[in-house]
Every structure is written in structure tokens, then in C-alpha cells.
Amino acid sequence: MAAVHIDAKELHYTPLNQQVRKAICDGAKEIVIDNVLGQRFIADGLRGDGVTITVNGVPGGDLAMFMSGPTVIVHGNADHAPGNTMNQGKVIIHGSAGDATAHSMRGGRVYVRDSIGYRGGIHMKQYMEKRPILVVGGSARAFLGEYMAGGLLIVLGLNGQAPVAERGVGSGIHGGEIFVRGIVEDKYLGVGARQLPATAEQVAMIRPIIEDFAKTFGIDAEPLVSASYSRIAASSARPFGSKYTPE
Amino acid sequence: MSIGSIPLRFKVELDTERCMNCGRCVENCSYGVFRKEDNRIDVNSRNCVACHRCIAFCPRDAISIYEKPTDYRSHPVWTREIREAVFNQAKTGKIIIAGMGNVLPYPMIFDRLVLDACQVTNPSIDPLREPMELRTYIGKKPAALSVKEYPNGDTDLLTKLAPNLKIETPIMIGHMSYGAISLNAQTALAKAVTKMGTFMGTGEGGLHESLYPYQSHIIVQVASGRFGVDINYLERGAAIEIKIGQGAKPGIGGHLPGEKVCADVSCTRMIPEGSDAISPAPHHDIYSIEDLKQLVHSLKEATEWKKPVFVKIAAVHNSAAIAAGIARSGADAVVIDGFRGGTGAAPRVFRDHVGIPVEAAVASTDAKLRSQGIRNEVSIIASGGIRESADIAKIICLGADAVYIGTSALVAMGCRVCGTCNRGTCAWGIATQKPELTKRLDPETNAVQVANLIHAWTEEIAELMGAAGINSIESLRGNRDRLRGYMLDEGLLKVLDVKSVGA
């Protein structure tokens, strides 16, 4: 089936999503949405294995929220919380993304070529084979990976700046791991987060992911995979375990 | 340890004349009070929490439990509870955590409101003879209807109606998660609400697959931890509830300790076994009322606008204004959880000191929404401290559409309100995940008991309505003229918009 084109000019998000759902229902595997300008909730709760949705323009908030299966490729920036509580699939953003990118994400991958806002990867979690991955090419703002309960977050700092140079990195983290190229200054680490240089095995584990990211955006992977990384993880699996006493 | 032991909270006495050494108390006590020693039963009163499991299963009525057998020097300021909290925190340096609801003796507004009845001038209605309409619809109602009329008298409704939940009684069961309570307890509640034509909430613990057969009577919750939330979960629920706050602990998050995350809880919440389940204080994608609107709309969009979305808040100082914001967010119902609401675990200081009574919060919310002309935009569900049918009739008169009950449904399954839910060793098999304890709770018989309670309260509400000459719950809602305040101060009468007795 040929690619289905949808013109989103002056189209509200509900009829837009209805057209996307209908196209998938009709068997489309390629959907291209042109003239996107701030429509929220694109691919919200959408299923569809093997379906690729190309978004040309700037989508509004909660892109691919609750999405379970498709791949969404954005040629432009994304507003806040792309990949919010996403279950499965892939979001590729050729640009930057706003706050709470990959909020509570539980599976699949989100790749952001440039930078993200505050609270990136906050409360990501994992279960069994579901292990969400967020990779950011540029840098992230404060509270990166706060309350993180699982999953993998990689920040590469390709924009010539530190991957993250603001407070609250991994505060309350109790699962999952954050890798940054280079290091995060200790003063920016949140309560309960601990940073160590990534071991050779750990770098080997993230290597195929970085290679995939580089390939996706046409970046040379070699300098990235040969760089040194730091790993930030929970200093304890029970950050609040010793806070309470029974009545 | 310089502080030493505190006095016994309970003293357990075994009447050796009556005891026949059957050992049922030993088997039933999950707190380690009883021990079999040769030919007698040894009692360790210090472990007793007064859950009465032993009393309920002693075949000879041989056990008695006395509260506070030792007196402190009485003092109106330095109560026993205050002193014991100081001892505890001096020893540990930690936040005190406890189960169930508010324990401070604040005056009960419900008990200072009385209902009306007909005498002479308008006849009361006999519910045995006349139909009483208790069916309620939860959700948005259109501000106006537009119809197309045909010459032959037929009409078409042109207004698009928002989805509503149809409940056969204004009593629903609030959100108690799998994790906070056992699967057997949730199953009993699910069977009861299905039988009674009403609904229950999942809490933030996901929906266990054994409850799928009851999903058309289940409201699924989305809270700040987003545990168990995926598109399948959202689609299964009859409605979706966004939990912003809880009456027992307004303003803070939740925390299910790793030891309660067994294999099954782990699967339902979608987190690794044994890991802490931490719900942050705010939703980190909601930092404003505009963001709330975004979450409401994202849930509706994900489920193709087929399901009502509720928003639950704790009753706090400005609930009415907050509810007005919620009514404009696209939500279909606002749940107001009063400061007497129960919980599996909450910091004592929050449980006892934060929030306001549901009576005042519901009355002011109803008034605020009416004054802004948006009362039809949301239903109001009252929760937190609903103890009996009279409370339900009164809160409906104050403007609620329906109620959530929680603790009373657990009491219907045997809970004695011992307040140690946080310890995970509930002898009644309710607030525990230990298989040897959860198996004590038979979902079938307990479903009957919970359904009985809902049925009995529904009958009582019908009788109260009939006595007041009202045959439809619609006519009771917000009908403050059917209430009078007894010994309430002028300020509170004004907030409730209720006259004094005699007026």
C-alpha cells in the first residue's frame, strides 16, 4: 500500500488522529502528515506494529503518549512530553524536545537529535522485557532522570555543551541508569544518585544503541563510541526505606 | 535505652476457665500475640493491635482485649498519643507512618446536620408502594439540548451527549489498589459492585487480569507513578480517574514498599518484583491547571472520547476554586476526598492535620460551580469518611452526585479499623500480600457482605427520601432545605448554606 498523506493544515488533533487510525485500520504502513503546527496528542494511544508516521512540522505536546508499536519520525522540534507513558515503538525527533520528554516511559525508544528541556526521562520505569531508552544528542536541563525507576537514558552533549549542567540529576532514582558522555559535576547530582565512570562492559552495552542513534541522524558513530562515559545510578534501591517509623 | 518501653496499648486476657486450648487464636493471630506452651496458651499483649481476629474465631468467648490498661498522668495538652509520638521520634528520628484515616477528635459535621421529614402538609412517599429513583448518571450534562422536530411528531436529538456512567445506587467503592489491599479483597469488591450495578476503582496498582471479567464496572486510575498504565488498561476501564490527591495525605505522593511488591503485584503494576513503587507528589507532566487539561484530553484522545475522565483531589482550603478549574479542564467528574479518608499508609502528621472535611468541601464546590453556571459540566463524587446511609443522604443534599466508600466496604469484609494496614500483616487478609493471610478472605462470601451493605444503605436512602416526600435522587441533590444544622456555628452554616434547626 502506498504511503498515506494527511494535510494537517488547520486540522484539529482529533480528526487528525482519526485519519491516522483509519489509515492503519485500512492497512497503511507509511503515513506522512504534512503542515503539522502544534497539534497535540499525535499518535496518542496508537497501536500498529511496523507502521511509520512521518510528522513534517512542529507537533504539540504529548506526542506518542501511551503509544504502543508505531515509529514516529518528526522533522522539526517537538513540544513537551513526547513519549509520555509510551509503551512500545520509536519516536525520532530531528530537532529538540520540550520538558518531561519520555515522562514515565515504559518501553520503546525516544531519540532526540538536539536538546531536551527540564525533567527528561523523569520516572521512566522497566518491567521484564520492557526497557525504555531515551537518547539525547545535545544536552538536558535540570532534574534529568528524577525518580527514575528503570530504563536507560543517554545524553551525548554533541552541541558542544556539557550533557547536563543543572541540579537534580537523578534525584530519587531507584532503578535504571543514566549515561552521559564525559561527566556530570558532582554538585548537580540529586539525592540518592551516584556517579561512577562507565566500565568497559557498560560502554559495550550502550554501544549498539549509540550506533543506532548515530545512524538514524547520519552522525559519525566512531568518536561517540570511543569516548568516555559516566554512569549515574541509584545509590540504594530503597531511597526512602529509612525515612519512616511505624506509629 | 533511656526511654524504655511504653505502656501496653492493649491487654489481652485469656479466661483459663473457658479456654479449651484449641489453639485457634494461635493460628489466627498474625501479630504473634499467642503461643502454645505445653498445655497452655501464652499471651504477649505487647504485640496486640486489637484487630479482634482471635476474638472472632475463639469458640468459647475466652478472650477479652482492654485498651490502654495503664494510665499516664492525665493531662489535657500532653495526651498519651502526643507523648508516645515524641518517644517514638526521639528513639528513631523518623517520620511516623500509620494506616487508616484521621484519628483526631475533630467535630463531625455530619453528626451536626439533621434531615427533614414530611408531616401533614405534604405526604411522605411509601417506597414499598411507589417507585423510588436512585439511578444516577455520572458525567457531563449538556447545558442545553437542541432537537430537530419532524411534522409527524418525531424528534431527533442533535446535541452530542458526553459519555456518562450509569449507577443504580449513588454508592460506589473508591480506589484501593492491588498492593494496598489483596487481590481477594479487590475481587470481592468487584463482584459486589457488578451485582449492585455500581462501580469500583482500581487505585494506582494496575488491573489484575483476573478482574477483567468485571472491567465494565471498574474505574481505572492514572496517578503520578503511572503504575500499570498502558493503552490496554485505559481501554478496559469503564472510566478513567486522574488522581491528583488523596484526603488521607494531601499534597504528598505514595510509596508502596518493596516487600509488598510480590510477583503478582509486580506484574500488575509493571515494575520489578521487590522494588519500591514510588508515586511522586505531583504528576510531573502536570504543573498547572492547563497541564491538567492536557492530561484529561490526552486520556480522552487515547480512548477515542468514549470514556468519562474523573479528577480526584483532596479536600483542601481552596477545593471549590480548584474544582471550578477542573470543571473547565474537560473532566467529567471531580472526586473530592475529605480529610477523614482512609489509606494503607500515610505520615501521621498529614493524616491528622492536613485537609478539610468533605461536607464543607462538597458544599462550597457545589455552590461555586452553580455560581459560575458550570455545575452541569462535572459530577461531584464525595469521598472520605462516609460511614452510613445518613451521611450519603446528607452529602447529596449538600450537592454531591454520588459517593465513594472505602473503609466501610473493608469493614464489611471483617476489617476492625485497627489502623495497622501499613504493616502488611492484616489478619483479615485485606491489607496484606502474604498468601497465608490473603487466603483467609473468601471473595464469594465477602462479595455478598459488601453487596449486602450497599443494598441496605440504598434501601435506607430510599426510605429517607420517601419520608421527605422525594421520589428521585435528582430532587435530593443540592436540596439544602432538607437539612438543618444543629449546633453549627454561623460561619459554617453559611459555608454549607444550611439553616439552623428551628429556622
Image (cartoon, coloured by chain):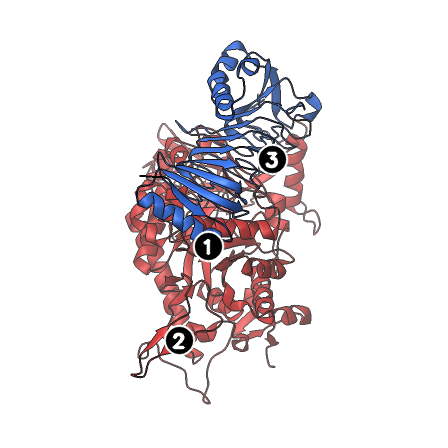
| x, y percent for residue B227 | 46, 39
Disc marking residue B72: none
Along the line of sight, the residue nearer the viewer: A152 or B103: A152
Q: Is residue A116 visible?
A: yes
Q: Residue furthest bottom?
A: B121
Chain A as rendered: colour: blue
Seen at 61% across and 23% down, the residue is A158
| Residue at the disc numbered 3 | A119
| x, y percent for residue B159 | 42, 69
Above or below, A139 relative to A205: below
Work out whether disc 1 and disc 2 sit on a shared chain. Answer: yes
| Residue at the disc numbered 2 | B147
Q: Secondary structure at mark 2?
A: strand
Q: Are marks 1 and 2 in contact (CB under 8 Å)?
A: no
Work out whether disc 3 and disc 2 sit on a shared chain. Answer: no
Q: Which chain is red?
A: B
Along the line of sight, the residue nearer the viewer: B374 or B489: B374
Q: CA distance from mark 1 to mark 2?
A: 27 Å
Along the line of sight, the residue nearer the viewer: A66 or B318: A66
The N terminus of chain A sits in image quarter? top left
Q: Secondary structure at mark 3?
A: loop
Q: Secondary structure at mark 1?
A: strand
* Chain bearing mark 1: B
The C terminus of chain A sits in image quarter? top right
| x, y percent for residue B229 | 43, 41
Q: CA distance from mark 1 to mark 3?
A: 26 Å
